[in-house]
Image: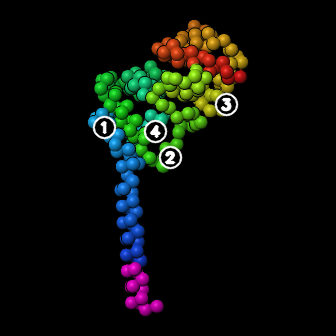
Amino acid sequence: MTQTTVRNIFVAGTVLFSVVFLILTYDTLKKMPQRTHEEGLTPEVVEGKRTWQKYNCNDCHTILGIGGYYAPDITKVATYRDHDWLERFLSDPHGVWAAERRMPNFHLTKTEIDNLVAFMTWVSHIDTNGWPKKPLMLAGAPEVTSTVKGEAPAAQGPRLFVLHGCQGCHMINGVGGKIGPDLTHEGTKHPDEAWQKAHLKDPRSVHTESAMPAFASLPEAELDALAEYLVTLK
């Protein structure tokens, strides 16, 4: 093979791969608005991003592959935590999730919280090719919507169990935490819905040594749905 032939092959290959690169780049840029839901990039989302930066949230949390690994990745958090839960958590982190490794309370304003939730919701809709995976304790949990109104209590129960962080401490059928009791057969142990509701409202009223936080602030309908769900666990 002559030097000229080698040079021609090299030039042809360079041109071919350059054309392929340009085509793929064009295709990516064309799809980007759809993958990022650009139409949802509202002023609230922009302000939420600024709030995220203001409080250095990336020091602990990862979002879209950027940030720390001390706290959970929140790229898809709005797909398994609803709007109300995120608002309550940002207002009082330890009151909603009483864990040993706790997020500090930044005493955010209502506007800052609304903007942060808008930002996280927008990010959760970005097409990231299925990454990151849903946390192990939430595996198999249903995707959330902004409301559970209109659903039957039987359908609400499993969803609310996930939304309010119950799986962080309790295991059901091998999925969840081990801080609290395994609830796989909770309905067999405590089949009374009234007992379950009282326990949710004030755990120490039925277990004086309980370390479980009280959920008395939940709406009555959600407490009823959770109690009805727990007694079905046989």
Given residues 49 and 180, the one toward you in this image is 49
For label 4, the residue is 76
Label pair 4/2, CB-CB below 8 angstroms: no
Q: Amino acid at mark 4?
A: Lys
Q: CA distance from mark 1 to mark 3?
A: 41 Å
For label 1, the residue is 42
Residue at 37% across, 75% down: 15
Q: CA distance from mark 3 to mark 4?
A: 24 Å
- In which image quadrant can residue 227 be found? top right
Q: Residue furthest front?
A: 150
Q: Is residue 138 left or right of residue 82?
A: right
Q: Is residue 188 left or right of residue 195?
A: right
For label 2, the residue is 130
Prevailing secondary structure class for the magenta stretch in the rendered image: helix
Q: How many neighbours does mark 3 have within 10 angstroms: few (below 14), some (14-19), or many (20 or more)?
A: few
Task: Pick whichever of labels 3 and 4 is earlier in the sequence.
Answer: 4
Residue 195, image x, y percentages = 62, 10
For label 3, the residue is 173
Residue at 62% across, 18% down: 228
Task: Pick whichever of labels 2 and 3 is earlier in the sequence.
Answer: 2
